[in-house]
Image (cartoon, rainbow, N blue to C red):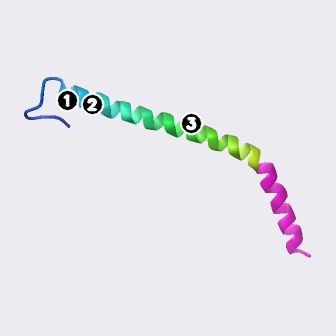
Amino acid sequence: MAGGWTKDGAEQEQMESTLEDAVQRARSQLLLEKALKSVRSVATPFLNRAEKRFLAFGSV
């Protein structure tokens, strides 16, 4: 955190910057989670079929 011989308003700028960084990280995480959910919804049927084939092959 700013302090000591810093210009006026430096502490406020530091807090705003920290807050903006946190907001950007949260937004990025939300977008990543949304993308992963989309991938899972598309991939799950394929993975389920592959798993069934694998299990059927293993029981022969």
At label 2, which amino acid type do we have? Met
* Marks 1 and 2 in Cβ contact (< 8 Å): yes
Disc 2 secondary structure class: helix
Name above or below for residue 19 compared with residue 49.
above
Q: Which residue is mark 3?
A: 31
Q: Is residue 18 left or right of residue 35?
A: left
Looking at the rendered structure, the secondary structure element under dot 1 is: helix
Q: Does label 3 or label 1 sit earlier along the sequence?
A: 1
Say which residue appears at 18% left-offset and 23% top-offset: 9
Q: Extreme right residue here?
A: 60
| Circle 1 crowding by C-alpha within 10 Å: few under 14, some 14–19, many from 20 | some
- Judge the density around disc 3: few (<14), some (14-19), many (≥20) Cα neighbours within 10 Å: few
| Separation of marks 1 and 2 at Cα, in angstroms | 6 Å
Q: Which residues are magenta?
A: 44-60
* Residue plotted at (8% across, 35% down): 4
Q: Secondary structure at mark 3?
A: helix
Q: Is residue 59 magenta?
A: yes
The residue identified by callout 2 is 15
Q: Residue furthest front?
A: 7
Is 11 within the magenta? no
Q: Residue at x 11, y 31 (%)?
A: 6
Q: Name the quadrant of the C terminus.
A: bottom right
Q: Amino acid at mark 1?
A: Glu
The dominant secondary structure in magenta is helix
